[in-house]
């Protein structure tokens, strides 16, 4: 009965690795995959993760029972704190509902399904370009996907004017997908001043922010700095969704561990100011209660989304994350290892830029050191990419995106030679 099926194409990103694996060349280089590699080109398990796993194995009281539908309670609380900030007014007022998700992708999908069922505006604006899975995740959840201008190929930077115009023209209430930091694939992020303008515009039009946070800590090396854009939107008391992934920042790719937090609208004024307005502190307490009630309703509906999809999430990855986040010493160790990964990527940017300068490769390559996070959007076109794959056995997505985390001091010269040959051909 399935004989008439059409062979589906490989995933455009994961398909790069399939092609790479088939190449017998000893000089082959995979810059397509968005996973961290060491200077030796090996996958990395963080020391702090190994230690957390050891603690879990040694704890004989641990069992393999099902988690609740929403996942591990400690993990959820700590994840919300990590992205929104420990002193977040939304967390303090119990305005946040958090569920464990299957890494970033699963958390985005649960958020999208929830919005498709319960939000009045079914249009989501995603940046152009964006991570290739975004349009599929949102469309299949039942949302209608539109794009807003984001990247300017001429400057290889942000098209801020275009972004403001497109969001300004979006229908009131529309959902807007924002990359919290280290935009994939461009490596181009707004400055904090630009974020503030985006926030003001979105709030003035009642646009609903849905943050995708797949690289917290990977952009600057600081977890707090990378969460700043999200925290600006939560601090103003408006609604906000955030999907988190621990794939990159804890190296837990295959554990599929992430979280979705939905912060309900609240009040920004201090308790004293509200008492002045409301007349009594009882009314304030009633208000806090009411908002906590919304979070509870949101959570109850998220459970209805999750239960028929995969029932409940896996326990191991979430236990590792919770073990690290709740122990201040392990948390500090994590930040040191995270910073080392971010720094190695920044050093690869510098080395590649220097190698191209040394070769006198035509063009301005300063975007390699200006762009942020795991990827460089090189500006190489599909034809040049195909040439580099055929002649130099270098694999990357056809849009010219290279993963800086897949490079090492040893492979930079090979890549620089290939880029030089591709642009001077
Ligand atoms: N969002 C973005 C922008 C990403 O780059 C990725 C990973 N490539 C994800 C979400 C999801 O990753 P995962 O499901 O592995 O956490």
Image: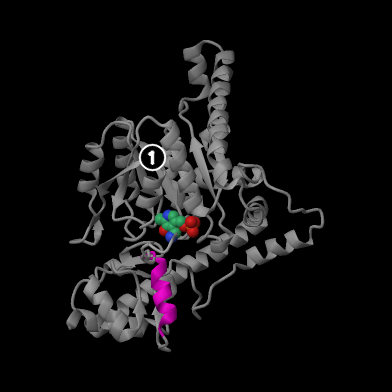
The quadrant where ligand 1 appears is bottom left
Q: Position of residue 187 (x, y in %)?
A: 34, 61
Q: Nearer the viewer, residue 74 or 112?
A: 112
Q: Residue at x 33, y 35 (%)?
A: 207
The residue carrying mark 1 is: 209
Is 360 left, or right, of 218 in this rendering? left
- The answer to whether residue 341 is above or below residue 41 is above
Q: Position of residue 40 (x, y in %)?
A: 51, 81
Callout count: 1
Magenta-colored segment: predominant secondary structure = helix
Is 246 left, or right, of 139 in this rendering? right
- The answer to whether residue 237 is above or below residue 345 is above
Are there few (<14), some (14-19), or many (20+) residues within 10 Å of tag 1?
A: many
Is 296 left, or right, of 212 in this rendering? right
- The answer to whether residue 174 is above or below residue 145 is above
Q: Residue furthest right?
A: 60
Queried whether the magenta region covers residue 19, the answer comes back as yes
Q: Position of residue 264 (x, y in %)?
A: 48, 31
Q: Nearer the viewer, residue 102 or 320?
A: 102
Q: Residue at x 73, y 64 (%)?
A: 54
Q: Residue at x 22, y 52 (%)?
A: 159
- The answer to whether residue 326 is above or below residue 283 is below
Q: Quadrant of the N terminus?
A: bottom left
Q: Residue furthest top?
A: 279
Q: Which residues are magenta?
A: 11-23
Q: Quadrant of residue 362?
A: bottom left
Is 287 left, or right, of 225 in this rendering? right
Q: Is residue 217 visible?
A: no
């Amino acid at each position: 009965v399935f004989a008439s099926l059409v062979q589906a194409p490989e995933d455009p990103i994961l398909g790069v690795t399939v092609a790479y694996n088939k190449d017998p060349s000893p000089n082959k280089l995979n810059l397509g995959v968005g996973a961290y590699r060491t200077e030796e080109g090996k996958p990395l398990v963080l020391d702090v993760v190994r230690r957390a796993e050891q603690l879990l194995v040694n704890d004989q009281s641990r069992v393999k029972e099902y988690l609740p539908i929403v996942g591990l309670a400690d993990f959820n609380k700590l994840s919300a704190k990590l992205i929104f900030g420990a002193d977040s007014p939304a967390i303090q007022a119990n305005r946040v509902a958090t569920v464990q998700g299957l890494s970033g992708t699963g958390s985005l999908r649960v958020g999208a399904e929830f919005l498709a069922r319960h939000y009045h505006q079914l249009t989501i604006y995603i940046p152009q370009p964006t991570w290739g899975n975004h349009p599929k995740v949102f469309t299949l959840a039942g949302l209608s996907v539109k794009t807003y201008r984001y990247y300017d190929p001429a400057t290889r930077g942000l098209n801020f004017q275009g972004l403001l115009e497109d969001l300004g023209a979006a229908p009131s209430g529309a959902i807007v997908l924002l990359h919290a930091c280290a935009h994939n694939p461009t490596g181009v992020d707004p400055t904090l001043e630009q974020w503030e303008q985006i926030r003001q515009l979105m709030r003035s039009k009642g646009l609903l922010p849905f943050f995708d946070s797949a690289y917290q800590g990977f952009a600057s090396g600081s977890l707090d700095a990378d969460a700043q854009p999200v925290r600006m939107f939560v601090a103003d008391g408006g609604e906000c969704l955030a999907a988190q992934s621990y794939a990159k920042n804890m190296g837990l790719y295959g554990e599929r561990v992430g979280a979705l937090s939905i912060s309900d609208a609240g009040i920004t004024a201090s308790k004293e100011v509200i008492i002045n307005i409301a007349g009594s502190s009882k009314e304030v307490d009633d208000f806090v209660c009411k908002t906590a009630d919304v979070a509870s309703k949101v959570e109850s509906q998220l459970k209805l989304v999750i239960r028929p999809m995969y029932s409940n999430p896996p326990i191991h990855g979430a236990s590792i994350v919770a073990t690290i986040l709740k122990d201040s010493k392990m948390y500090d160790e994590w930040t040191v290892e995270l910073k080392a990964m971010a720094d190695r990527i920044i050093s690869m940017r510098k080395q590649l830029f220097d190698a191209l300068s040394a070769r006198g490769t035509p063009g301005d390559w300063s975007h390699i050191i200006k762009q942020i996070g795991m990827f460089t959007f090189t500006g190489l076109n599909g034809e040049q990419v195909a040439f580099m794959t055929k002649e130099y056995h270098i694999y990357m997505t056809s849009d010219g995106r290279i993963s800086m985390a897949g490079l090492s001091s040893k492979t930079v010269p090979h890549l620089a030679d290939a880029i030089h040959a591709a642009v001077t051909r």
